[in-house]
Amino acid sequence: MSFLSGKDIDVTVEKADGSTKWCSVRNLRPVPGNTGAVRLLIDDRLGLQRIIWRSKDIDDGPTGGNGIAAYGEMKDKLTDTYGNPRASSEESGASVYTSPSQFYQCLAADGCGAYISRWNADDGEVYLRLTPGESPNSGRLEVTYDGPEWQALVSGRRRK
C-alpha cells in the first residue's frame, strides 16, 4: 500500500476477493482521538474506493444521549466540510422498541430507527451513522467515504 506512508502506519489485508482487498489501518494520523478502527477497500484497477472510520464505543445510558450528542458534533464537522447534508434521518422508536430506554436496541432493528446523514463530496459520497456498540448501553459513530468509482465497483461485483 505505497500510497499510505508515514511513521508507524500499519496496513493489514484482512480479506482479498479477486482484485479487491479489505484492509485495516493502524497508527494512521491525523484521526480523531476516539478512533476505534479504520478500514479501506482498495481495488487493483480502481484504487481506493471506500474508507470506513469507526469510533470507539461511546459509553451511554439507555436513552442514547451521549451517542446522539456525539453524532450531532460529527454531523456539524462534516457539514462544515461538505455543506448541508443531502439527506438525513434522525429518528427512533417506530413500532418495535418504543421505550426511550431501548434506544440502541431500536437502532439495531431494521425499520425501527436510524441516525444517518449523507453528503455529496467532490469525488464521492460521505455517510455518517450512529450504530449500536458492543454493550447494550453504548453506541459508535461510523463515517463512510465512497469514492467516485464505488458504484461501478459494486455493479461489477453483482454481474459476476
Image (tube, rainbow, N blue to C red):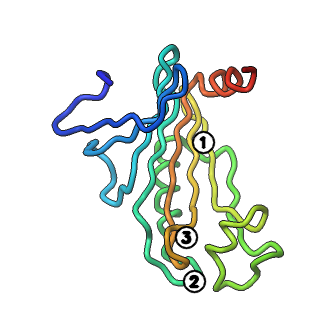
Nearer-the-camera pick, 84 or 115: 115
Report the residue marked by disc 2. 62
Residue at x-position 51% and y-position 83%? 61
Left or right, 32 with respect to 64, comes to left
- Residue positioned 29% across, 21% down in the render: 2
Q: Quadrant of the N terminus?
A: top left
Please provide percent x and percent y for residue 31: 32, 48
Distance Cα–Cα, label 1 vs label 2: 29 Å
**Within-10-Å neighbours for mark 1: few <14, some 14–19, many 20+:** many
Quarter of the image where the C terminus is located: top right
Can you give x and y, in whole percent of width and height, for residue 5 in the image?
Answer: 24, 29
Task: Pick the residue in front: 85 or 140.
Answer: 140
Q: What label sits on residue 119 in the rendered view?
A: 1
Q: Which residue is mark 3?
A: 68
Task: Between label 2 and label 3, give the one nearer the viewer.
Answer: 2
User: Of callouts 2 and 3, which one flags the residue occurring earlier in the amino acid sequence?
Assistant: 2
Q: Residues within 10 Å of mark 2 (few under 14, many from 20)?
A: some
Give the amino acid type for the residue marked by disc 1 in the picture: Trp
Please give the name of the residue rendered at 71% of the width and 71% of the height, measured from the top-left corner. 92
Residue 12: quadrant of the picture: top left
Q: Secondary structure at mark 3?
A: helix
